Image (cartoon, rainbow, N blue to C red):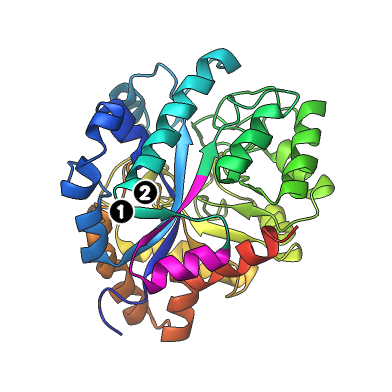
Amino acid sequence: MANSEPIIFDGHNDVLLKIFRAGGLTAAQSFIDGRDGALDLKKARRGGFGGGFFAVYVPSPTDLNAKFDEMTKASYDLPLPEPIDWEDALPVVMSEAAILFDLERRGALNVCRSVADIRAAMAESKIAAIFHIEGAEAIDPELHTLDVLYQAGLRSLGPVWSRSTVFGNGVPFRFPSTPDIGEGLTDHGLRLVKRCDELGIMLDLSHLNEAGFWDVARHSTKPLVATHSNAYAICNHSRNLTDPQLDAIRESDGMVGLNFAVAFLREDGKMLADVPISQMLRHLDYLIEKLGEDRVGLGSDYDGAVVPQDLTTVADLSNLRQAMTEHGYDNALITKLCHANWLRVLEKTWVS
């Protein structure tokens, strides 16, 4: 197995936000030429990054450096950011989505609307990108925007980021803490679940609080998926999944993508990069034990989080594959973890 094989299809990255902040469409070429960040075309080729969920995200007015500094403490409780109005969120979503489609026009990636599209992109050694929205602030309560965005290519949606929307509530960045922090989905949220099921839009349960998770579990007919979350039993952070949640994901034949964000990996919950890959393997072992080999993958959060120092960019992904091999995972399991399991769950989710 070569260092860049099998290729990695990843559950979450925030490169569109970074390009948006760097100038939007005028900065899109940096994805091809090389940029100061975790993900671009050149790094993807070096690391065998084959694609994944490209998040469109509306940022809150937050001092990220202050936030990450706070998360280096032994305990912390960052307040939930204020909700963002639809009128403010929609232009940002349109701008970031425009970057995604511009990258497709430039030949940097293919926007994929089906598993067949993903397989075709992989066969052509093109990055396979899923149009994903993290936090549904740009979706109106009547869901008109959802239908239009679906036609544009939206195939995955997180009802919340870590702030409230008209659809439900997210978990705060709080350690130690359980995800059981408040009310679940609203009536609008329940209608969103139903409409996403009808359209074949995957619902991402990462960031959703525990009550909202169980509302989706009760009302969705599709597999339960958390694109970038870890095991609460190892790191008792509000962003991680409890054993009962993992049991429900297994029963639904769903999926969890391992989040590389160090605060959700470390037992002390700190946002510090000196985390060995062996700690990631502890989470993978636990998730495989709870979910089975077919329901675990990767959800890096590249360009959106502090990640382990040996995996700073997608160019470093060979370090993770090598660690998996040395840990005793065979080629078949590594292939499942790297991309096959994502394709499996999407085939079940996107079929209407």
Q: Is residue 111 visible?
A: yes
Is residue 125 on the magenta stretch?
Answer: yes
The picture places residue 348, in percent across and down from the top left corner, at 69, 65
Disc 1 crowd, CA 10 A, few/some/many (<14, 14-19, 20+): few
Mark 1 and mark 2 residues within 8 Å of each other at the beta carbon = yes
Q: Residue placed farthest to the front in the image?
A: 105
Q: Which mark is residue 155?
A: none
Q: Quadrant of the C terminus?
A: bottom right
> Residue at horizontal 25%, vertical 50%?
40
Pointer 2: what residue? 104
- Give the amino acid at mark 2: Glu
- Give the amino acid at mark 1: Gly
Q: Is residue 253 above or below residue 202?
A: below
Local SS, label 2: helix
Q: CA distance from mark 1 to mark 2?
A: 5 Å
Left or right for 92, reference 245: left
Pick the residue in front: 299 or 80: 299
> Residue at horizontal 55%, vertical 70%?
341
Pointer 1: what residue? 107
Q: Is residue 80 above or below residue 233?
A: above
Q: Is residue 240 above or below residue 52?
A: above
What segment carries the magenta color?
A: 115-131
Local SS, label 1: loop
Pick the residue in front: 242 or 40: 40
Disc 2 crowd, CA 10 A, few/some/many (<14, 14-19, 20+): some
Q: Quadrant of the N terminus?
A: bottom left
Is residue 32 on the magenta stretch?
Answer: no
Pick the residue in front: 97 or 238: 97
The picture places residue 284, in percent across and down from the top left corner, at 48, 66
